[in-house]
């Protein structure tokens, strides 16, 4: 019997490269066939064959209130009736800019874009123009979208599919990007010494969440801040995942380090395509039309996208979502740790608030090399074991799990039981 999903997979394979519009959605490394989603509500999704799953991908973090939250859907509907797009400034752009600057005090001015990729790409261009330098430092396993300067030893789908540095990026571009192991401040210092007056910026995920999930060592971020300031380079935090999720003010609030520029995305669009980048006024003022750095977008600041994003962020604040996410996350951790303990396998569990990752490797894991020690075959079997029990985790060891405010204690308990059984089968 062919399922509707397999029928769609066959058609998609013919007309869409790899059958997917973003490689992270493919099931290549976990085996089995991917499914097509029909709808979602709260923490649950249903595929086109009617199977139900508790979802821990949540549109890669965008769905922090769960799927189709009523307030957000209504805000989009209301906005849509008034017009889908104008290419003329609309009031929501001012409201969003004010909210972002209030919640992230390192940001004086902000531009809206349509994706996280556009946000980081624009940060790099701006940093190069502001400093008059060409080279950038990034970190192995940190993913910053798919713009040329950042596709060097990257994480996420590129890592999952075994090509962390992309074909098609000219050698001359890649040579301007220096990728270093995360959590090694000494190497950053040495790299600055070797490239005197050559480094425009250091860009990183302050909490790397695209090669699994691991954390900055104590003082790593403040060491980066100091090196950048001393050497006249800009510090760029890519908070496309962490911004407004790990705390109201993102990772920069938790660690108390102030970047010069910040890239945002995912949850600020409430499920619609949005990104943003912002920072110190004197840097942002380099942008056209005030300054010489060109950056633009036909749909940037789109009223539907901003209605969705603003409503989602305000709702998160109204219900004190961060406290709630920590509570649900703590409950998840309790179940996960108990299941792991009984399974007597080499597993490292990481969590921060609503972000989590199970590495099939012994800890400590503090960088990409550590994450890559994971047993990928074992992860694949675990993934399938959970999937057949109605739990949808990201189909890769090198992704992070996302909990939403819609995950109920019962959902978490069911997930814990499924994880226990799936681990028991390994
Ligand atoms: C998802 C992601 C991006 C890219 O955002 P897109 O909207 O997919 O272009 C950039 N940085 C980080 C940290 C991300 O997780």
Image (cartoon, rainbow, N blue to C red):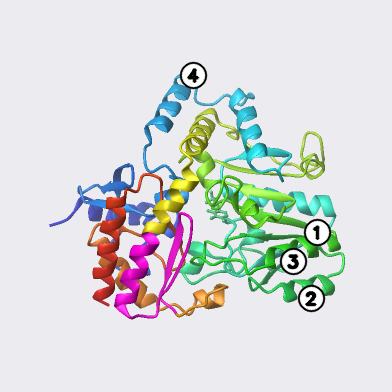
Which element is circle 2 on?
Answer: helix
Q: According to the image, label 2 marks what residue?
A: 190
Q: Nearer the viewer, mark 1 or mark 4?
A: 1
Mark sitting on residue 84? none
Q: Give the residue displayed 85% in from the left and 59% down from the top.
A: 232
**Where, by quadrant of the figure, is residue 337 drawn?**
bottom left
How far across and how far down the image is residue 374, in percent? 44, 77
Q: CA distance from mark 1 to mark 4?
A: 44 Å
Which element is circle 4 on?
Answer: loop
Q: CA distance from mark 3 to mark 1?
A: 13 Å
Q: Is residue 202 magenta?
A: no
Residue at the extreme left: 1
Q: Is residue 42 above or below residue 149?
A: above
How far across and how far down the image is residue 165, in percent? 58, 68
Say if residue 120 shows up in the picture.
yes
Magenta extent: 332-361
Q: According to the image, label 4 marks what residue?
A: 82
Q: Is residue 354 magenta?
A: yes
Of the pair 384 and 98, the residue shown nearer to us: 98
Quarter of the image with the C terminus is bottom left
How far across and how far down the image is residue 260, in percent? 75, 51
Q: According to the image, label 3 marks what residue?
A: 223
Circles 3 and 4: CB atoms closer than 8 Å = no
Q: Is residue 329 above or below residue 219?
A: above
Q: CA distance from mark 1 to mark 2?
A: 14 Å
Q: According to the image, label 1 marks what residue?
A: 233
Q: CA distance from mark 4 to mark 2?
A: 55 Å
């Amino acid at each position: 019997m062919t399922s509707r999903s397999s029928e769609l997979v066959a058609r998609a394979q013919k007309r869409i490269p790899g059958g997917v519009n973003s490689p992270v959605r493919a099931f290549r490394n976990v085996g089995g066939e991917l499914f097509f989603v029909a709808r979602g509500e709260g923490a649950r999704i249903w595929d086109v064959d009617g199977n139900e799953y508790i979802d821990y991908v949540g549109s890669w973090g965008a769905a922090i209130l769960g799927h189709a939250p009523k307030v957000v859907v209504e805000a989009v509907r209301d906005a849509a009736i008034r017009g889908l797009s104008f290419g003329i400034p609309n009031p929501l752009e001012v409201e969003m800019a004010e909210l972002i600057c209030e919640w992230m005090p390192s940001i004086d001015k902000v531009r809206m874009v349509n994706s996280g990729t556009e946000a980081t790409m624009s940060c790099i261009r701006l940093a190069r123009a502001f400093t008059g330098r060409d080279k950038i430092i990034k970190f192995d396993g940190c993913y910053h979208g798919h713009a040329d300067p950042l596709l060097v030893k990257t994480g996420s789908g590129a890592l999952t599919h075994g090509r962390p540095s992309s074909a098609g990026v000219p050698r001359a571009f890649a040579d301007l990007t220096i990728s270093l192991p995360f959590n090694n401040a000494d190497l950053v210092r040495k790299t600055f010494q070797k490239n005197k007056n050559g480094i425009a910026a250091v860009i990183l995920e302050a909490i790397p969440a695209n090669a699994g999930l691991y954390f900055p060592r104590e003082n790593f971020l403040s060491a980066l801040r100091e090196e950048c300031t001393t050497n006249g380079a800009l510090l760029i935090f890519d908070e496309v995942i962490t911004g407004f999720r790990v705390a109201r003010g993102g990772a920069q609030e938790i660690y108390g380090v102030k970047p010069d520029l910040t890239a945002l995305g995912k949850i600020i669009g409430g499920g619609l395509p949005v990104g943003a980048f912002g920072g110190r006024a004197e840097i942002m003022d380099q942008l056209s039309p005030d300054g010489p750095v060109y950056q633009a977008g036909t749909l940037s600041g789109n009223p539907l996208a901003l209605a969705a994003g603003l409503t989602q962020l305000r709702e998160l604040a109204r219900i004190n979502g961060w406290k709630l996410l920590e509570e649900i996350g703590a409950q998840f951790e309790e179940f996960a740790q108990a299941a792991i303990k009984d399974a007597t396998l080499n597993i490292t569990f990481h969590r921060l608030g609503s972000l989590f990752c199970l590495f099939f490797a012994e800890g400590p894991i503090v960088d990409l090399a550590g994450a890559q020690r994971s047993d990928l075959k074992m992860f694949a079997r675990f993934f399938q074991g959970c999937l057949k029990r109605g739990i949808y985790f990201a189909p890769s060891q090198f992704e992070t799990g996302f909990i939403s405010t819609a995950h109920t204690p019962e959902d978490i308990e069911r997930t814990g039981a499924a994880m226990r059984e799936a681990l028991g089968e390994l």
